[in-house]
Amino acid sequence: MTEATSTLRPNTRTAHAAHAGRFELWFRSLFNQGRGFAFACDAEGRVSIEGLSERGRRNYLFARAMVGREFATPSVRTATISLHS
C-alpha cells in the first residue's frame, strides 16, 4: 500500500477515536436508581480500553463482570454533558 492510498482510507482506530465521546456505554445500577458507570464508546458500544485511565479500566472491567449481579445489561446512549471540570 502506498502512502497516498493509506491516507484515503481511515484505519479502524482513527475512525473509532473520531466517534468516541459522542456516545457512552451505560451500566445502570440494579439497586441504586440513577447510579452506574458510563464509558465513552462508539455507536456500536465499543469502548477503547487503551484510552481509559487505570481506574477507568478497572471500573469498566468490574462493570462488565457484574452485569446481572450489580448492573443491568449495558446500553449505548448519547453522551451526557458533564458540568464538572
Image (tube, grey):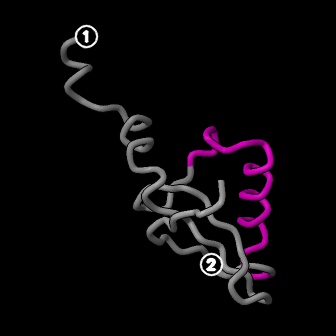
Q: Residue furthest top?
A: 2
Is tag 2's residue or tag 1's residue first in the polypeptide sequence?
A: 1
Residue for badge 2: 73
Queried whether the magenta region covers residue 21, the answer comes back as no
Residue at 59% in and 71% down? 26
Residue at 57% in and 46% down? 48
Q: Quadrant of residue 31?
A: bottom right
Q: Tag 2, which secondary structure?
A: loop
Q: Which mark is residue 3?
A: 1
Queried whether the magenta region covers residue 67, the answer comes back as yes
**Which amino acid, by three-letter code, is at mark 2?**
Thr
The answer to whether residue 62 is above or below residue 15 is below
Q: Is residue 11 left or right of residue 36?
A: left
Q: Is residue 2 left or right of residue 56?
A: left
Q: CA distance from mark 2 to mark 1?
A: 42 Å
Pinpoint residue 24: horizontal percent, then vertical percent: 52, 63
Pinpoint residue 35: horizontal percent, then vertical percent: 72, 79
Pinpoint residue 75: horizontal percent, then vertical percent: 53, 74
The answer to whether residue 28 is above or below residue 56 is below
Q: Is residue 51 left or right of residue 37?
A: left
Q: Tag 1, which secondary structure?
A: helix
Q: Quadrant of residue 62?
A: bottom right
How packed mark 2 is, by other alpha carbons closer than 10 Å (few <14, some 14-19, many 20 or more), is: some
Give the overall secondary structure of the magenta segment: helix
**Which amino acid, by three-letter code, is at mark 1?**
Glu
Pinpoint residue 29: horizontal percent, then vertical percent: 73, 81
Quarter of the N terminus within the rendering: top left
Depth order, front residue of 62/51: 51
What span is in magenta? 48-69
The answer to whether residue 79 is above or below residue 67 is above
Q: Is residue 67 left or right of residue 10?
A: right
The answer to whether residue 5 is above or below residue 69 is above
